[in-house]
Amino acid sequence: MTDPSYRGQILVFTTPLIGNYGVPINKTPVDSKDVGVILESERIQCSAVIVADVAEKFSHYTAVESLASWCKRFGVPGITGVDTRAITTLLRDQGTTLGRVAIGEEASSPPPNPADYWDPTTENLVAQVSTKAPFVLNPSGDVKIAVLDFGAKANILRSLVRRGASVTVLPWNYDFYSVRDQFDGLFLSNGPGDPNHCMEAALNLRKTLQEWDRPVFGICMGHQVIGMAAGLDAYRMTFGNRGHNQPVLALASSGSIKAGRVYVTSQNHQYALKLQDPFPGGWEPFFINCNDSSVEGIKSTADSGKKVWGVQFHPESAGGPLDTIEMFTDFLTECRAHRLTVGNVEKDVRSTAQVIPTFARENPKRVAVTA
């Protein structure tokens, strides 16, 4: 409910009883271990909640309020006593559907005309949830990572911070190219809605990918933006892939990922990249969904000289499988390796600069200086 990727959506929970844990105080320290919130953002992001049976009493020792009071506090409508199995069957038959929550007399009245429904895909939802100004987490980290925020889950930032990174979070359409050399790597986050609304970010990224040789990693929306920057098209899926049990087949090896292995992943996406043949030069498919054969990841080829990966799933999803969590470690390992290489080159340059004046004093006739 707090994941910004659910912005504008009505969530239908298939678990019969919802809310028995309750809701905790959603604040934590901002330090090298955490990012300020316990949940995925500071507020409820979805538009409405539908459950079969809501628990009025909560029992978790950290809870301070019920699901109902939490929704009321943020002005998010909810409805209970509904056969969510019937709704699920409907959605499985016809795909993601525009809808509304109605009770009492309104529920028995004729439905609105199709044109009267609000369609969230027509709006740039990313611009609504992205940070409006840059901010830094864990500034003392040993490797500097920039995050383009398309609606980043807190656990993405937490996964970077807890692995020792200094994280600078930037607005979704920030001109990263102009500050690229301040960072050791670039991360593109998840986000809601239609990726085609983020073409500005894709075009900005294209120049970075062409001229920057440092690691780049994207998740979900970030993966789609990388794909569009590479020349691929994004399309709207009929059903989308959601849940904690989506199997994906690795088509290539990279770091902890081994080609030929099936990984169980957490996903929440309505859009995907088109699989095309031939693939854009310098790029190759990384993962494919075992259920519907949709593209679940792309990566730069070995001969491209780049270190770029994008995955449609969520490696960091703490509520689901952790088969691919080490991709965060892989990314930061590449960033640290590049930082070490650059640091050694700069050190050699400084050493040379220090030697030349001494050598010139000792051998004034053997040194020529040109401007």
Image: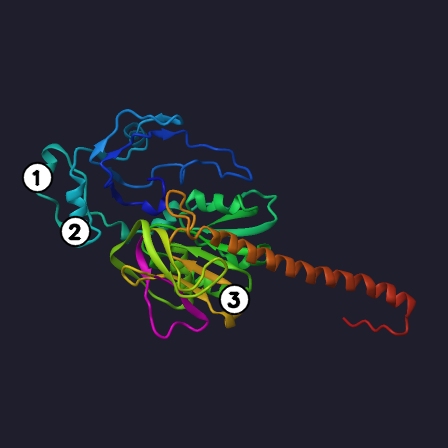
Q: Are marks 3 and 2 in contact (CB under 8 Å)?
A: no
Question: Closer to the camera: disc 1 or disc 2?
Answer: 1
Which quarter of the picture shows residue 272?
A: bottom left
> Alpha carbon of mark 3 to alpha carbon of mark 1: how far?
58 Å
> Alpha carbon of mark 3 to alpha carbon of mark 2: how far?
46 Å
Which quarter of the picture shows residue 202?
A: bottom left
Q: Is residue 163 left or right of residue 64?
A: right
Q: Which mark is residue 129?
A: none
Residue in the picture at 45% in, 36% down: 37
- Labels in figure, total: 3
- Residue position for label 2: 115
Which quarter of the picture shows residue 25?
A: top left
Identify the amino acid type marked 2.
Answer: Ala
Mark 3 or mark 2: name the one nearer the start of the chain.
2
Question: Closer to the camera: disc 3 or disc 2?
Answer: 3
- Provide the secondary structure element on which disc 1 rests: loop
Q: Are marks 3 and 1 in contact (CB under 8 Å)?
A: no
Identify the amino acid type marked 1.
Answer: Ser
The answer, for residue 184, to whether it is visible in the render is no
Residue 98 drawn at (x, y percent): 20, 48
Residue in the picture at 17% in, 54% down: 94
- Residue position for label 1: 109
Picture layout, residue 319 above or below residue 187 = above
Residue stretch rendered in magenta on the structure: 269-288
Mark 3 or mark 1: name the one nearer the start of the chain.
1
Identify the amino acid type marked 3.
Answer: Lys
Q: Is residue 182 magenta?
A: no
- Residue position for label 3: 306
- Provide the secondary structure element on which disc 3 rests: loop
